[in-house]
Image: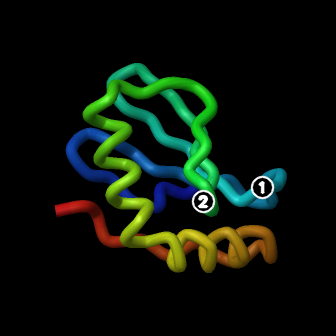
Amino acid sequence: MPEISNFYGIFIYMYFDDHNPPHFHVWYDGYEAIITIQDGIITGSLPRRALKLVYEWLDIHKDELLENWKRLTNSEAALKIEPLK
């Protein structure tokens, strides 16, 4: 499971050949969540502040996330995505 990015203790991962819809996994301080790329639907839980940061990052990097989704479904390596600053 490649790490795509990390910032402020938040770790973003994507799995190879994962199920649809396109999404990414978030780990933060014992919390875990799955967030869809297109509409930001969350499964699991994150503290409000962490979720706000993840949504901000998602808004900035949606195209890159979708590209990584395509790469991983084709068994290609994922590219790192710039962390939130």
- Residue 74's x, y, as percent? 80, 76
Judging depth in this view, the residue of 26 and 61 nearest the camera is: 61
Quick check: 8 above or below 39? above
* Location of residue 3 in the rendering, given as x and y in whole percent from the top left corner: 48, 55
Q: Amino acid at mark 1?
A: Pro
Q: CA distance from mark 1 to mark 2?
A: 8 Å
Q: Residue at x 32, y 43 (%)?
A: 52
Q: Which mark is residue 59?
A: none
In the shown orientation, is residue 7 left or right of residue 3?
A: left
What residue is drawn where x is 28% and y is 63%?
A: 83
Query: Could you tell me which secondary element the residue under label 2 belongs to?
Result: loop
> What kind of element bears circle 1?
loop
Residue at the extreme front: 39
**Residue 40 placement, left or right of 51:** right
Rate crowding at label 1 as few (under 14), some (14 to 19) or many (20 or more) other CA atoms within 10 Å.
few
Report which residue position mark 1 lands on.
21
Residue 43 figure quarter: top right
Q: Residues within 10 Å of mark 2 (few under 14, many from 20)?
A: many
Image spot of residue 8 (x, y percent): 21, 44
Asked if marks 1 and 2 touch (Cβ < 8 Å), the reply is yes
Question: Which colour style is shown?
Answer: rainbow
Q: Earlier in the sequence, mark 1 or mark 2?
A: 1
Which residue appears at 83% of the width and 51% of the height?
19
Number of disc labels: 2
In the image, which disc is placed on residue 37? 2
In this rendered view, identify the residue nearer to me: 59 or 12.
Answer: 59
Q: Is residue 54 above or below residue 9?
A: below
Amino acid at the residue labelled 2: Ile
Compared with residue 80, is residue 50 higher up or lower down, i.e. above or below?
Answer: above
Viewport quadrant of the C terminus: bottom left
Rendered residue at 54%/33% (across/down): 33
Image coordinates of residue 11 in percent, x first then y, are: 39, 45
